[in-house]
């Protein structure tokens, strides 16, 4: 059995969304509202952008910082292989 291509996956997702809309009592043509109603991302501070860029360059890996108004946040470092993760861990150990 082969993996479904993008068009097949899109059709499957679209079918599931239509079914969900109908079961929620909405017309099936309201599907576009369900699929695209996402919040706008909050404006990011230039200082935060600069800090992300500095960390990305220092660690040689993409870094994303999420910061809330309460002062809490999250730092995400992406890696693509275990070797890359090992390299990141070595940088932290120094």
Image (cartoon, rainbow, N blue to C red):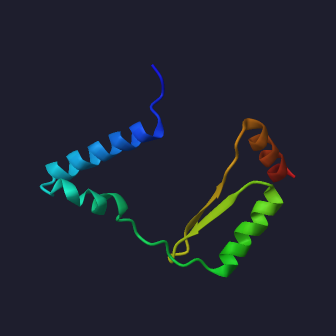
Q: Give the side of residue 91 with respect to residue 47, left or right.
A: right
Residue drawn 40% across the image and 37% down it = 8
Along the line of sight, the residue nearer the viewer: 91 or 64? 64
Q: Look at the picture and state if 2 lies above or below 18.
A: above
Tell which residue pokes out farthest to the top in this image: 1
Q: Position of residue 28 (x, y in %)?
A: 19, 53
Along the line of sight, the residue nearer the viewer: 63 or 24? 24
Q: How many marks?
A: 0
Q: Give the side of residue 12 with respect to residue 69, left or right.
A: left
Which picture quadrant has residue 13? top left
Q: Look at the picture and state if 68 lies above or below 24.
A: below
User: In which quadrant is the N terminus drawn?
Assistant: top left
Which picture quadrant has residue 72? bottom right
Residue drawn 47% across the image and 35% down it = 5
Residue drawn 35% across the image and 42% down it = 11
Q: Position of residue 16 (x, y in %)?
A: 28, 43
Tell which residue pokes out farthest to the front in this image: 7
Q: Look at the picture and state if 92 lies above or below 50.
A: above
Q: Give the side of residue 18 with respect to residue 39, left or right.
A: left
Along the line of sight, the residue nearer the viewer: 65 or 4? 4
Q: Position of residue 44 (x, y in %)?
A: 58, 77
Q: Give the side of residue 34 with respect to residue 42, left or right.
A: left
Q: Look at the picture and state if 22 lies above or below 43.
A: above
Tell which residue pokes out farthest to the left in this image: 25
Along the line of sight, the residue nearer the viewer: 9 or 39? 9
Residue drawn 87% across the image and 52% down it = 94
Q: Position of residue 35 (x, y in %)?
A: 34, 57
């Amino acid at each position: 059995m082969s993996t479904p291509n993008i068009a097949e996956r899109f059709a499957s997702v679209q079918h599931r969304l239509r079914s969900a809309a109908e079961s929620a009592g909405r017309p099936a043509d309201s599907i576009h509202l369900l699929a695209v109603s996402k919040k706008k991302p909050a404006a990011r501070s230039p200082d935060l952008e600069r800090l992300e860029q500095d960390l990305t360059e220092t660690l040689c890996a993409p870094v994303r910082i999420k910061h809330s108004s309460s002062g809490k946040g999250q730092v995400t470092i992406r890696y693509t292989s275990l070797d890359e993760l090992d390299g990141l861990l070595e940088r932290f150990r120094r």
